Structures are given as structure tokens and as C-alpha cells.
Amino acid sequence: MSGTVFEKAPARDRRRFPGISSRAYEHPADRSALVALRRLSGFDTVFKALSGLLPERSLRLLFLSDSVRVGETQFPHLYAMLRDACYILDLEKVPQMYVQQDPKPNAMCIGLDEPIIVVTTALVELLDEEEMRAVVGHEVGHALSGHSVYRTVLLFLTGLALKVAWIPLGNVAIMAIVTALREWFRKSELSADRAGLLVGQDVNASMRGLMKLAGGHHLHEMNVDAFLAQAEEYEESGDLRDSVLKILNVLPRTHPFTTVRAAELKKWSQSRDHQRIMDGHYPRREEDPDTSVTDSFRESAAHYADSVRTSKDPLMKLVGDIAGGAGDLGGRLRDRFTGATGAGGSRASGPDADGQGKGTTGQG
């Protein structure tokens, strides 16, 4: 199955993207986080060592012996989706796919030499056909982007960190790389979400799937607009203390928060970049060797600058103020940690440090 080359058209009329490069749907933060990861001291050494030591054959045998391999006679509807996704993204070699018994809805793409896609029974039972199609496309997007290699390293290092936690400093070194890998992987999920949309070509199905991951089967009790409003409230609410808590909450996670993923995907689905891909204008794999690394860095830097400029998060606003040379940064920092703002985003007048009673206007 893993070497199957196919010519069948998709199950329903959807656009196909011959020769599409993963650069077409990669989130700028994905590329920049991966660059930062590769620059981490010791990462290259660890990665090269693990590439030869990771028990990939054992991993394949484990899934082969204790999961159900998707094919024409087992979970044929998933096999059709898998072939469909590979056809649309022009991934010639169909990855092996397994269904694993697990009460938690999840999916992953791992493997060093060849990617393996694994979905849990809970996920299969939770999603309808179109929602599942987006998930399969998401995992095929990981395969096309080469994410499975780093995901495998992350899984191995996470387990290793637990085993050497008793060794002084040993765990610190490993956890530094694990933390950087998690940061990259969270960003790579945003790229794969876009790939899932390119495969499913139904943004409503993608939104429903993300809502179900957050709220379970009760789709009739949920609303897409209200769900997206949660993401906006999450970004805007609170002061700098909340911004710090957001960072601490996300650090141990491999995936971004679900509402954030939904908001990012909805925004991209309405962008000119997405429309250009749907119109057939996208980077090709044959052009990848000629791609300018400098241009990629510049694009990522521009994305982050724009994110800081437009973000409504209190910490990002402060970063923007600092970058813009705004005055009274000490007062702004104090106010945003304490939430002491007056009407219209201005700090209430009162005695300041020198007792002059002079108020300072802050940015909301």
C-alpha cells in the first residue's frame, strides 16, 4: 500500500494542486520557528545522533502488530480519503495509515525515512466525513512538509526527558531542545491546518472539526461565530499578568489552543494567499532548490512585525510600544500588570512617583 501510485480522481469535485510546494501553505511562524530550532546550541548534534538511533523499525512493527492498518479492506472510507488527499496535494507515495484504539481524539504523522499517519478511534467516531477529510489532509500536509521527522524526535526526547529527570543538568539540556521543538510544532500545526483546508476545500467542515475537538459531539449546542469570538476574547482580555499566564499555559503543549487554530485558519481562508492557491497560482516543488533563504527570513520577520503591530494582547501591545519608542514605559508596564487604566485606555490621574499628581495617557 505504501508504494501505491494512483490515478483516480477525488470522490467529489475539488481542485487539485499538481507539484504544489509546502511553501504554498506554510505559516511564516512555522518556517521561522524551525530556523530558530536549528540554530539552538546542540540541536544539530542531537538530531544527527538520534537519526541513527531512533527505533523506527520498532515503531512500525508496533503499529503493525497492535493497530489496524487502513486499506481497501480495513477502514476503506479512510483509505479513500487518504488517497484523495495525496492526489490533491500531489503526494505520489501514499503513506501507511493506522487506526489506534484510544479514548482521546488525536492524529499524528511520524517517521524518519517514510511518514506514518496514525488516527485514534475516538477521532474517527467524533468527526463526520468532511471533517475527517480535513484531518487526513492535515496529516498529509505534515508528510509533504517533512514535519514527521521532527515530530518523531520530539516524541523520543519527551520520553527520554522523563527517564533522565534524576540526572543533574542532564534533563535541563534535553528540555531546552524539547521546549524549542514544541514551539516549532505548535507553529507547524497552523501550516498543516491550511493543508487540511486545501484538501477538504470546505472551511465550515474545518471549523466544525476544531469545535468538536474542543467541545465533543454536541455540535448542535455550538456555534462557529461564538467559537471564533472566544479566540478574540482570549487574545484581548486581561493585563500583562494574563499574557504571562497564556505563555505558561501553552509551553507544555504540542498544539496551539483550538480557538486560536480556528481563528488563524478562518483568517487565512479569507486571504488573498489562499485565493491565489485556489486559482492555481502557487509555488512548485521544482522551484524549492532555488528558493532564497533570505527572502524566507524576511517574510517571517515581516509576519512577526505585523503580528506585534496588530495584536490586541497586552504583552504584544507593550512590545509594540517599546519598538515604537513610546514614552513612559515604566508607567505603562506598571499599569498593564495591575490593570489600572482609566476610561478610553488612559491611566487615571493621580500622584505619580514624584508626588506631582500628573496623569499620563496610556494606550488601550
Image (spheres, rainbow, N blue to C red):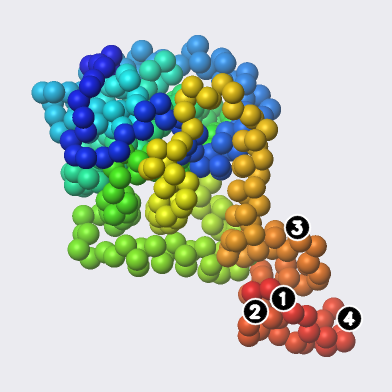
Q: Earlier in the sequence, mark 2 or mark 4?
A: 2
Q: Residue at x 24, y 27 (%)?
A: 83
> In the picture shown, does residue 308 fall above or below 138?
below
Q: CA distance from mark 1 to mark 3?
A: 15 Å
Q: Earlier in the sequence, mark 3 or mark 2?
A: 3
Circles 3, 4 touching at the beta carbon (< 8 Å): no
Q: CA distance from mark 1 to mark 2?
A: 6 Å
Q: Which disc, if any, is residue 323?
A: 3
What residue type is disc 3 on? Ala
Circles 1, 2 touching at the beta carbon (< 8 Å): yes
What residue type is disc 1 on? Gly
The number of callouts visible is 4
Crowd band around label 1 with a 10 angstrom C-alpha radius: few (<14), some (14–19), many (20+): many
Q: What residue is disc 4 on?
A: 354
Q: Which disc, if any, is residue 362?
A: 1
For the N terminus, the image quarter is top left
Q: Earlier in the sequence, mark 4 or mark 1?
A: 4
Image x and y of residue 357, in percent: 83, 88
Q: Earlier in the sequence, mark 1 or mark 2?
A: 2
Q: Secondary structure at mark 2?
A: helix
Crowd band around label 4 with a 10 angstrom C-alpha radius: few (<14), some (14–19), many (20+): few
